[in-house]
């Protein structure tokens, strides 16, 4: 019985940590990205949308990570119609993974 209870607690912990990670990605997005990309990732006059974004959908995590951490400015800008470039963001580790997971969820919409 103790083993069954222990397993149940472990399973709940794993389930909770997965949803906590997604919540963190959304919270970080809201704090660092939403001002330019829109609260729901719909895009604004300042930056492109993430909803349906082919780059986010098709790219591997390391490519998305490179854009987030290095930014895109000048000749490296992908979307020339926006006046400003993508500024560097100081995200790493779990925060970066959580944001990328959130971006992927937005792109899938």
Image: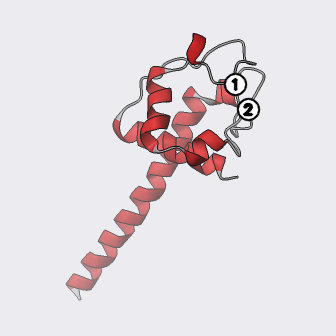
Q: Quadrant of residue 70?
A: top left
* Disc 2, SS: loop
Say above or below: 104 vs 43. below
Task: Count up the numbered dots.
Answer: 2
Q: Residue furthest front?
A: 75
> Residue at the spot x=43%, y=58% of the render?
18
The alpha-carbon separation of the residues under discs 1 and 2 comes to: 6 Å
Horizontal placement of 36 versus 29: left or right?
right
Q: Quadrant of the N terminus?
A: bottom left
Where residue 89 appears, x then y in whole percent?
Answer: 47, 22
Where residue 69 appears, x then y in whole percent?
Answer: 44, 25
* The one of 25 and 52 positioned closer to us in this rendering: 52
Circle on res. 16 = none
Q: Residue furthest left?
A: 2
Say above or below: 26 vs 82. below
Q: Quadrant of residue 85?
A: top right
**In the rendered image, which residue does mark 1 sit on?**
47
> Residue at the spot x=60%, y=51% of the render?
105
Q: Residue furthest right?
A: 45
Say above or below: 66 vs 84. below
Q: Residues within 10 Å of mark 2 (few under 14, many from 20)?
A: some
> Residue at the spot x=54%, y=39% of the render?
27
Q: Residues within 10 Å of mark 1 (few under 14, many from 20)?
A: many
Where residue 43 appears, x then y in whole percent?
Answer: 73, 32
* Disc 1, SS: loop
Disc 1 to disc 2: CB gap under 8 Å: yes
**In the rendered image, which residue does mark 2 sit on?**
43
> Residue at the spot x=63%, y=24% of the render?
78
């Amino acid at each position: 019985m103790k083993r069954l209870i222990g397993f149940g607690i472990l399973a709940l912990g794993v389930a909770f940590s997965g949803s906590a990670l997604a919540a963190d990605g959304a919270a970080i997005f809201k704090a660092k990205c939403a001002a330019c990309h829109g609260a729901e990732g719909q895009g604004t006059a300042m930056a492109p949308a993430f909803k349906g974004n082919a780059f986010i959908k098709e790219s591997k995590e390391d490519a998305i990570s490179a854009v987030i951490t290095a930014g895109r400015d000048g000749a490296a800008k992908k979307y020339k119609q926006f006046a400003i470039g993508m500024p560097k963001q100081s995200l790493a580790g779990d925060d970066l993974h959580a944001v990328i997971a959130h971006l992927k969820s937005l792109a899938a919409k």
